[in-house]
Amino acid sequence: MHPTTKAIRTQIERTEQMEHSSPMFLTSSFVYEDAEHMRAAFADEIDANIYTRFSNPTVQEFIDKICILEGAESGFATASGMSAIFASFMALMKQGDHLLVCRSIFGSTHTVITKFLPKYGIDYTYVDANAKPEEWEAAIRPNTKMIFLETPTNPALDVIDLELIGQLGKKHNLIVNVDNCFATPIGQRPIDFGADLVVHSATKWIDGQGRVLGGIVVGKPDLIHEIYLFCRSTGPSLSPFNAWVLSKAVDTLDVRMQRHASSALYLAEKLQNHPQLSWVKYPFLPSHPQYKIAQKQMKNGGGLVCFDLKGGLESGRKFLNNLKLLSLTANLGDARTIASHPASTTHAKLTDAERQAVGITPGLIRISVGLEHPEDILQDILQALEEK
Ligand SMILES: *Cc1c(COP(=O)(O)O)cnc(C)c1O
């Protein structure tokens, strides 16, 4: 069976009510038959739930489904994408370790790496998204423990060769940790290319309707066990309510991502020669600098498109103000199309040089393509480009 079919057909065991849809186990703790049963549960001798900070059936259903889609053996779900990323760092690195990381990463991940990890004696080196293999390898130190990256990158949509990074990880015995939020397991499976861990902000495409926050990390069982032990004691666990919403959302992920991706490709093709734009970037557009790599490792180009307005910063602001249909919001991966202008919002605090280094030009617009009819999305963008 295909992973999608298996994921849709994965459910927690039916109760005697014979429900068809999985119920929500909104409970903080679980009970025992007797003292011996409880003792065995606490001694890890039997597979029993104890407390929802450690495990919960509804949360486990969500984990099982993402493991199937990612081709992973084990996983742990967290309250947000950031807690999944933070837990994967804290559980697997210690004082004196070094993290090799691609420069083009989510803003809060950048803050964790540059502001908080150094407090615990964990050092880092940034490598450019389009660095050559030799440059990645040259940045590895004897104390390097992990490589962390996102592909496609945020917000400039550069594509990093997962096979190459996977081989580098094996050669130097490093943990390869990939934030697969942008592509989702429908678009790309980093474990197939040698990743040890995959992290997600389930808040984005996995939920797909902008309702709940959630995160997950999946991968090698020994690594996940360490992450589980860290989370079990520190408490960033996913709420069963959010897990229930996310588990239902996984059932439509494949069909939704196909529509997001086909609409995104349609927009990219229609916009690519527009006179107001200096360029349009989408992983499955042949003009994308890493088009060949994208074709090798991705099944579709994902739901994000970006373009550069010739007029720079002021045009970016004008474009946002002219939009009638598209939403202005900090999220991505929603049923409703979202436009953002990183230079005046999410990345406004960076210097020009810092923005340049991660591919953010003053006129860069990122579109998170929703499920509306693609022609209506295009028309709104076109009229916003024309308005003065
Ligand atoms: C949003 C996002 C995160 C953080 O996820 P939260 O659920 O908001 O904590 C991490 N990585 C990427 C690529 C994201 O887009």
Image: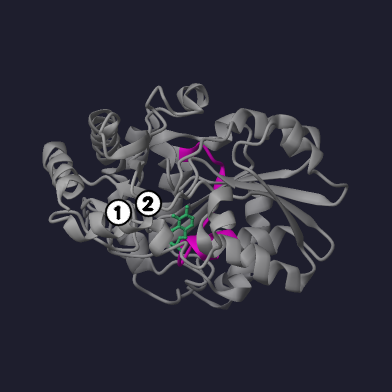
Q: 347 or 316: which is nearer to us?
A: 316
Q: Which residues are magenta?
A: 70-85
User: Label 2 belongs to which residue?
Assistant: 312
Q: Is residue 282 above or below residue 54?
A: above
Q: Is residue 314 visible?
A: yes
How many marks can you see?
Answer: 2
Figure check: 240 above or below 302: below
Residue 58 sits in quarter: bottom left
Disc 2 under 8 Å from ligand 1? The reply is no
Give me the residue at 61% from left, 50% from top: 103
Q: Going by the image, does 172 lie left or right of 47?
A: right
**Drawn side of residue 120 relative to residue 148, left or right:** right
Q: Is mark 1 within 8 Å of ligand 1?
A: no
Expressed as whole percent of the image width and height from the top left, the position of residue 85 reads: 57, 59
The residue beneath circle 1 is 315
| Closer to the camera in the image, 18 or 370 | 370
Give x and y (percent) for residue 191.
57, 36
Image spot of residue 123 (x, y percent): 77, 61
Q: Amino acid at mark 2?
A: Gly
Q: Nearer the viewer, residue 186 or 100?
A: 100
Residue 201 marker? none
At x 26%, y 54%, the residue is: 338
Residue 373, percent across and down?
Answer: 12, 40
Which quarter of the image is occupied by the N terminus? top left
Q: Are marks 2 and 1 in contact (CB under 8 Å)?
A: yes
